[in-house]
Image (tube, rainbow, N blue to C red):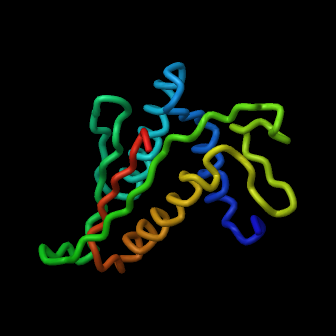
Amino acid sequence: MTDRIDPAWLAELSEWLRIPSVSADPAHADDVRAAGEWLCDFVRGAGGTAELSETGTHPLAIGEIRASAGAADAPTVLLYGHFDVQPPAPLELWDSDPFEPDIRDGRLYARGACDDKGNFLPLLHVACAMADAGELPVDVRVLIDGAE
């Protein structure tokens, strides 16, 4: 399956997956923040706006990519997800390092590859590609939680 993925997209996702954003472990608080900053940088790099918003626990990444026409009456679509991951323990049950993406039998394995970094990033890529092409018909708001 990974042979159908743009190598640049796979490299970006792998970079994000390497951040051990385990919100349940206080030792990873800086990593959770780093994963949120990574996402904000991605949105800003696509021409949108984004910032981390503090909460009582871990930050939210909040951003927006405006409709191509810039119309004040463009509908709004919300992309919601989370960039934190569950603790990888017990490590002995992993066939590879949970924070070093590994492709086996055409599938990508890493903590967060399916829940939720790997599910969210393609949606954001589509919005960015449509905006780059001048074809984004909606305002896209991004709300990504650092503590599911």
- Asked if residue 29 is positioned above or below residue 122 in the image, the reply reads above
Direction from residue 14 to residue 64 in the image, left or right: left
Q: Find residue 105 and report its horizontal and vertical position in percent.
A: 87, 61
Direction from residue 113 to residue 104 in the image, left or right: right
Residue under the point 58% across and 52% down: 115
Q: Find residue 23 and report its horizontal and vertical position in percent.
A: 49, 32
Residue under the point 45% across and 48% down: 82
Picture quarter with the C terminus: top left
Q: Quadrant of residue 111?
A: top right
Most foreground residue, 124 or 27: 27
Q: Find residue 132 and report its horizontal and vertical position in percent.
A: 40, 70
Q: Quadrant of residue 55?
A: top left
Q: State the residue lying farthest toward the top.
A: 27
Most foreground residue, 145 or 17: 145
Residue under the point 37% across and 71% down: 131
Residue under the point 77% across and 31% down: 91
Q: How many numbered discs, if any?
A: 0
Picture quarter with the N terminus: bottom right
